[in-house]
Image (tube, rainbow, N blue to C red):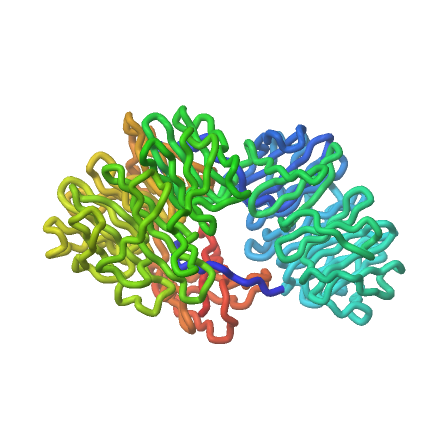
Amino acid sequence: MKRKIISLIIIVLFNLISASEIFSQTCWEATNGPYGGICNILKSINNEVYAGTNCGIYSTNDNGISWNSKTAGILGECQNIQDIDVVNNTMIAGTLDSGIYISTDFGNNWISSNNGLNDPFLDLHIYDVFVDGTNVFIGTLNGVYKSSNQGSTWTPSNIGISEPNNINAIRFVKNGTSIFLGTGNDLYKSNDNGFTWIDLNNSFQANPFSLISYGGAIYITGIDGIYKSTNSGTSWSLLPFNFGIPTSLFNSGNNLFCSSNGSTYVSSNGGSSWTLVTNKGFSTIIEFNNKILGGNNGGVYSWSNGTQTINNAGLGGASITKALFRDGNLIYSANANGVYRTIDDGNNWVNISAGLPLNVVVNCITKAANKLIIGTKGYGIYTSSDNGNTWIQSNSGLTLNGIFYSNITSLFTYNGRVFMGAKENITFYNYASLFISDNGGNTWTKSSTGLSDNCNVSSICNFGSYIVIGTKDEFSPSSFNDGVYLSTDNGGSWLFDGLPGPVGAVCSNSTGYFASITDIIYSTTDMGNSWTSHDFDTGSSFYGINTIANINNTIYTVQSNGIRFLNSGIWELFDAYCLSSDQTQLISNSIGTLFTGANTVKTYGGGYYIINNGVSKYNGGSNSIIENEFYIDLIIYPNPTSNIVTIQGKEGMNQSFTIIDQMGRIVIKEKLNGELTEVNLSSLSIGIYKLKIEGNYNPAQIVKE
């Protein structure tokens, strides 16, 4: 199945840590939230519901009102869990890149169990875990493996499967005495407990995405719709389903559920007719204590009697925090799951999204006229006069000539006036502009004198009484208008400030102001008459810097392999234990504690692993790297690319590497050729691919244009 990629990842870095090197203890500490992440699987086991997420395993016994972490013993703690099952009171969890973990105490403690899974590229990528009696089957990039001893050892079980190392996805289901296996390309059946497999493609012509056994029949989704077999796969009938391509099937009680095109439908008559349940699509659905629980990219939801509730309290793996804002002793955070508030430096977070659209994406936060103001993606502005307990939509003035500027890209307050960058997302042209409010966001006025018609404002700051903005007209053909602009009359008019290019961020300190253009940060101390570039050292190249922060008059930037600060014109490493998307923020509280939305990590046996996807804080202390410790950055360029991509490492590197497509198929397998390795991607289709290098390297992504 081909998936439409909405966003392109253009930063590709690897960090290698030798197994003989030991890093000093990190001073970054995960706060207790915010909550909510990608939920891949829900399973009811031993009177509890277990959630496998993109950041570990969690359990609940109160319908998701609260979740408890179950990650003890799992390497890195923030493993991407693909599936969970149980055999003879032994829980088995399959991960995206680290193989199998087992637990004999219902998730309180886990141990790695990969005996027999010998290929680190293929065998440790787990699609599915399936229990049949005392036997356990797992689906990997290298085909099917079977265990008859609760997952202690694994043996291949691929007789009859065509090209088991070229499988897109694997899903198991049992019907009668037969086990069925869907690979994304083919459908197989085993009548001898997985010893051999029979190809059923002669009787079934659709690519199976999802399959379940329900009411004595087998149901399978494919590009053409939902198929049903009542004779153990001998023949199939196409069911009526007119709501797009069905992607996921689930059964709960007497009901059959199907997700398609971001919505979920239910059938109580075996698929003969369908009714809309919710405008949310799910990757997993179960029934527990008379409630339906569903998991998707926003976390876990429950619904009962037509009421839908998000149930993410305590569920880790939150999406990267894009907005952090401090107001006295209050700190506000926002991610794809809503807005959160803490009054105790992150020890406890409260979700304050009541009144906001479900799963609203909040891009930025500010405050003016005693009102909290948030900028959203697609819904415009919301304001709150009670610290986020209640919200009012406030978009007066944001619709001009029939265009609703609903996607808020930046917010900044200076002397009570709020400056806002906004764009719309309906037309191909993508209109964008700068707006001003003098009444706490009640009404907005366009401020465009001296700016281009399509002015996408990426960042705003002040230098003294002057307002500085950075623009990045990424969807406009007039990209030559990108750059830094200055207003000397509080936003009444704007002048180009001498620095052209797509600006990711602007920031100021007492001496001047700073702006990032792709992978370089520039500064000016003379109002833009001249600019000085502050390049990073050659071993620390980055692409698309979107975060610059002023902490106690020192300039910091958050990047893919840590935080750096500017010291006498030279960038110094502040902390190499903090990984980040390119869009997070860095703030400080009143006593100097730093907060960031970047992923925090720990080191284990020569590798590093994410332990937190929420907000982290730094309380001070030693952050230096001790003797004989170092990071080696492998730079991938150009990225995106239309043909050739170069992997830049160090002399003598000859590790094997693979490039894997979105369906999990290996499309290229080669070896590195020393310091520079060129890889020809001309045979690949346009899309995003995963690059995996043998050894302690993290996987990264390559974009083929």
**Residue 15 visible in image:** no
Looking at the image, which residue sits at the far right? 231
Residue 611's x, y, as percent? 47, 38
Residue 194 is drawn in which quadrant? bottom right
Residue 467's x, y, as percent? 21, 47
480 or 622, which lies in front? 480
Residue 112's x, y, as percent? 60, 40
Q: Residue at x 49, y 60 (%)?
A: 6
Q: Residue at x 73, y 30 (%)?
A: 47
The relative height of residue 554 versus residue 47 in the rendered view (above or below) is: below
Q: Residue at x 44, y 44 (%)?
A: 362
Residue 344 is drawn in which quadrant? top left
392 or 296, which lies in front? 392
Q: Is residue 540 left or right of residue 30?
A: left
The relative height of residue 319 versus residue 537 in the rendered view (above or below) is: above
Q: Residue at x 38, y 57 (%)?
A: 400
Q: Is residue 511 left or right of residue 432?
A: left
Q: On the rendered image, what quadrant is the N terminus found in?
A: bottom right
Residue 105 is drawn in which quadrant? top right
The relative height of residue 327 versus residue 407 in the rendered view (above or below) is: above
Q: Is residue 78 left or right of residue 202?
A: left
Q: On the rendered image, what quadrant is the C terminus found in?
A: bottom left
Looking at the image, which residue sits at the far bottom? 682
**Residue 123 visible in image:** yes
Q: How many marks?
A: 0
Residue 437's x, y, as percent? 31, 44
